[in-house]
Amino acid sequence: MFGEYKRLNSRVGMSKRSAKKSTSEKKSQHPSATKGKLVEEIVQKMHDSPNVKVERRVFLDSVGGSGKREIDILLTSSVAGYPVRLAIECKNEKTPIGSPKIDAFVGKLQDVGIPSQLGIYVSASGYTGGAIERARKAGIKTLVLTGLTRIVYRRPLLRLSNLLLTSSPRSRSSRYRTSYPQ
């Protein structure tokens, strides 16, 4: 699960010349991208269950045929023989998520043909009041991932057994607790 961190840490102690990376490598290893990937991995594992296909970083075709859009986590199953897809957007930012990010997610869901009522937004930093209200109007479930500690010097400081995914305030109450060994 943390192979990426091992790769990042293996560069410590290298000479400047040997530690140079291509632009694409630098982009994929940017600390904020790394933090986002970590939340995606955690959310993916938390939603793993029988009869549900859980995929990470899925590119879905736009309904209008104007390209592809990335879904952080896509849950696919069937209910009474009908296919159902839930899309999860994951964010690990310093500040609470605002309504512009919720609006962007609503637009992404519309673009790929997933009803906004089947959208879930997971944030490690919470939401502004405007974001919660916008998500509520669109039918998007807002969840907060707690128990995730900060990443210092590119090393994850996690106690996986303490992670908790809860509904944000003024949203329907639900809780998911991890079942990872320490």
Image (spheres, rainbow, N blue to C red):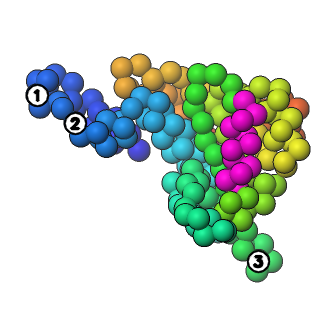
State which region is magenta: 98-109
Is residue 113 magenta-colored? no
Closer to the camera in the image, 127 or 109 = 109
Which residue carries the number 2 mark? Answer: 21
In the picture, which quadrant includes the N terminus? top left
Give the residue at the far bottom of this rendering.
Answer: 81
Above or below for 135 versus 128: below
Asked if residue 35 is positioned above or below residue 153 in the image, the reply reads below
The residue beneath circle 1 is 17
Q: CA distance from mark 3 to mark 2?
A: 47 Å
Dividing the picture into quadrants, the one containing residue 171 is: top right
Describe residue 106's horizontal placement relative to residue 29 as left or right: right
- Seen from the viewer's position, the closer of residues 114 and 84 is 114
Q: Which mark is residue 82?
A: 3
Which residue is depicted at the point 43% across and 35% down?
Answer: 34
N-terminal of the two: label 3 or label 2? 2
